[in-house]
Amino acid sequence: SLHAGQYCTNPGLIFIVDSDKSKKFISELGLSLSQVGEQTMLHPSIYENFLRNEQKINANDEIKNIVELRPSSSNSITPILRITDIDNFLLSKELQQEVFGSHTLIVLVKKEEQFMRAVQSLNGQLTISIFGEEENLLKNRSFIQNCEQKAGRLIFNDVPTGVRVCKSMNHGG
């Protein structure tokens, strides 16, 4: 949620196996995000686009809100955390679109094969972080190769560190 998710570090999508461990993770993440105060977006048009995109996702009946957008001042947001299942994610193009800002959608997966379907459904991504033990990563080479085709950068067992806004940084569209 660093700087309203505008430093390219906010995980917009998290695919996780539906289990007791994942439920604990989601609960702890929700508690942590609910304690983050409002943060200002860089520009009013970015703020408006954030609201428009998050409303499209919120309109999906199969979405469960874990941490909802709280009322805030002009051009400011609070983190949002939502959850859905893989079937709903695959059926909804809106859920597959990035929401630039502090918005995270957790997609619950029942079987490991569903991770591959999820990655194949994605448009290009800036970064994909993959978490797993070395043995598990080695036996899932085809999954990793699919991720390589979808993202400009793969990170293993870590998250992006973000970008530094400075004169020498060429970043953006």
Image (tube, rainbow, N blue to C red):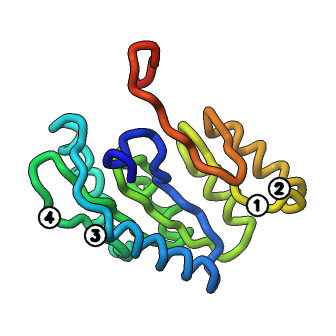
Mark 4 sits on what residue? 71
Q: In terms of secondary structure, where does tag 3 sit?
A: loop
Q: Is residue 49 toward the left or the right of residue 150 in the image?
A: left
Instruction: Tell me which numbered mark, 2 or 1, is placed earlier along the sequence.
Output: 1
Residue 147: x and y in percent read 69, 44
Pointers 2 and 1 in contact (C-beta within 8 Å): yes
Q: In the picture shown, does residue 152 fall above or below 144?
A: above
For disc 1, the neighbor class at 10 Å (few under 14, some 14 to 19, many from 20) is few
Mark 1 sits on what residue? 132
Say which quadrant the C terminus sits in: top left
Q: Residue at x 37, y 66 (%)?
A: 33
Pointers 2 and 3 in contact (C-beta within 8 Å): no
Q: In terms of secondary structure, where does tag 1 sit?
A: loop
Type of amino acid at the residue the image marks with label 4:
Pro
Type of amino acid at the residue the image marks with label 1:
Gly
Type of amino acid at the residue the image marks with label 2:
Leu
- Label 4 to label 1: alpha-carbon separation: 37 Å
For disc 4, the neighbor class at 10 Å (few under 14, some 14 to 19, many from 20) is few
Instruction: Tell me which numbered mark, 1 or 3, is placed earlier along the sequence.
Output: 3
Q: In the picture shown, does residue 44 fall above or below 158?
A: above
**Disc ID at residue 68:** 3
